[in-house]
Image (tube, helix red, strand yellow):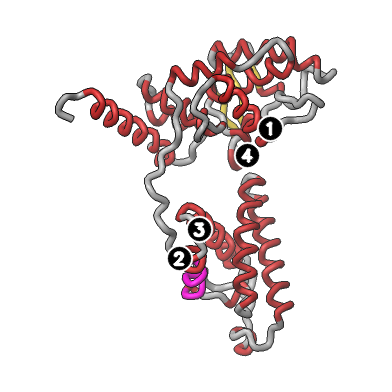
């Protein structure tokens, strides 16, 4: 597509009204959303990018700038304003990712010659390590979860699968009945970017899932052989907020310190306990569905921290 050239008056924003700037931002954001959808980015990511860039659009329109008129110094001033507002480094880094995606999209569609965000730096996120349950706490949580009713059977299956297969909350609620292969003791998981991976299912998770399929799910829906694996009381597919709410209830009942115990903490615990047991980092990468080994290496830092803490507690010369 040919580059869209603006005349000198437009390039300095003197001929464009506030409505023109707002319309230009609207077109750019719609274009980006279409590109992100075609690339298979999760809806949650697309929603986050839309919210982040809407803020940039407001900031730019206040300064009479359309997307094509922004330059690197102005983007740096915007990031400085975010820091002054008190946004965390992680949040600002996410804004930078959204901004880079927007200007890459505009460049690919021929609307700008160069991306002003190509050299836009992101703040360091800090050395934040994920919350990990100890193996006894994870066992205590799962043993406390459940009951004879359909919702208890569902919750036991849900959290056995979350911890036993290292699933993200999004992956958990997207499971269908057909994704469970009982004979091969494995699970088909639909991950980020519509990537599908197959993971083994351990005996506790498999037995809990079978109990739910045979004694729980048929009491909530007639068609027991297909459709969403995990259902609400009314028979609809669960949402990630449902998963978080139910987990919080079971964590409290199990008497575990609740701070930081999220569905993702179960995934972190899965990976860390695999590493503790001697699993290869590459194998853990495949099981988690990480695109980069660098993402998986965070668990080596978790293990290193635990070793140092054990040394500090136990060694007389620590």
Instruction: Using the numbered discs, state the Cα–Cα distance from disc 1 to disc 4 in whole angstroms.
Output: 22 Å
Q: Residues within 10 Å of mark 2 (few under 14, many from 20)?
A: some
Q: Is residue 24 visible?
A: yes
Q: Mark 2 vs mark 4: which is more N-terminal?
A: 2
Residue at the location (49% across, 20% down)?
138
Q: Nearer the viewer, mark 2 or mark 4?
A: 2
Task: Name the magenta segment's main secondary structure.
Answer: helix
Disc 1: which residue:
242
Q: Nearer the viewer, mark 2 or mark 3?
A: 3
Residue at the location (44% across, 41% down)?
292
Q: Position of residue 260 (x, y in %)?
A: 50, 35
Front residue of 170/225: it is: 170
Disc 2: which residue:
120
Q: Residue 66 vs residue 203: left or right?
A: right
* Residue range of the region highlighted in magenta in the rendering: 73-79
Question: Which type of secondary structure does the marked residue at label 3 adopt?
Answer: loop
Q: Position of residue 84 (x, y in %)?
A: 48, 66
Q: Nearer the viewer, mark 1 or mark 4?
A: 1
Q: Circles 2 and 1: CB distance less than 8 Å?
A: no
Front residue of 20/152: it is: 152
Q: Residues within 10 Å of mark 1 (few under 14, many from 20)?
A: few
Q: Is residue 59 magenta?
A: no
Quarter of the rendering occupied by the C terminus? top left
Q: Mark 1 vs mark 3: which is more N-terminal?
A: 3
Residue 194 numbered tag: 4
Disc 3: which residue:
87
Residue at the location (42% across, 23% down)?
134
């Amino acid at each position: 597509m040919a580059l869209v050239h603006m005349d000198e008056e437009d390039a300095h924003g003197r001929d464009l009204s506030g409505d023109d700037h707002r319309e230009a931002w609207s077109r750019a954001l719609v274009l980006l959303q279409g590109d992100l959808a075609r690339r298979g980015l999760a809806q949650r990511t697309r929603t986050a990018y839309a919210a982040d860039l809407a803020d940039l659009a407001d900031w730019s329109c206040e300064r009479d700038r359309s997307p094509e008129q922004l330059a690197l110094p102005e983007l740096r001033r915007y990031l400085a304003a975010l820091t002054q507002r008190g946004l965390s480094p992680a949040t600002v880094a996410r804004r930078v990712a959204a901004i880079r995606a927007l200007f890459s999209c505009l460049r690919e569609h021929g609307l700008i010659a160069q991306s002003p965000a190509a050299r836009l730096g992101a703040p360091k996120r800090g050395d934040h390590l994920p919350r990990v349950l100890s193996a006894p706490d994870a066992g205590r949580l799962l043993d406390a979860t459940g009951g004879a009713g359909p919702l208890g059977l569902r919750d036991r299956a849900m959290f056995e699968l979350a911890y036993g297969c290292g699933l993200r909350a999004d992956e958990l609620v997207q499971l269908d009945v057909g994704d469970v292969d009982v004979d091969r003791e494995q699970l088909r998981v639909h991950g980020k970017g519509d990537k599908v991976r197959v993971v083994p299912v351990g005996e506790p998770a498999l037995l809990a899932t079978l109990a739910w399929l045979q004694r729980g799910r048929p009491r909530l829906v007639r068609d027991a052989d297909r459709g969403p694996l995990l259902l609400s009381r009314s028979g609809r597919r669960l949402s990630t907020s449902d998963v978080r709410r139910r987990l919080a209830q079971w964590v409290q009942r199990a008497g575990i310190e609740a701070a930081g115990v999220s569905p993702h903490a179960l995934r972190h615990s899965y990976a860390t306990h695999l590493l503790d047991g001697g699993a290869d980092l590459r194998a853990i990468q495949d099981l988690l569905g990480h695109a980069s080994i660098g993402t998986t290496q965070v668990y080596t830092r978790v293990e290193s921290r635990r070793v140092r803490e054990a040394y500090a507690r136990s060694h007389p010369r620590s």
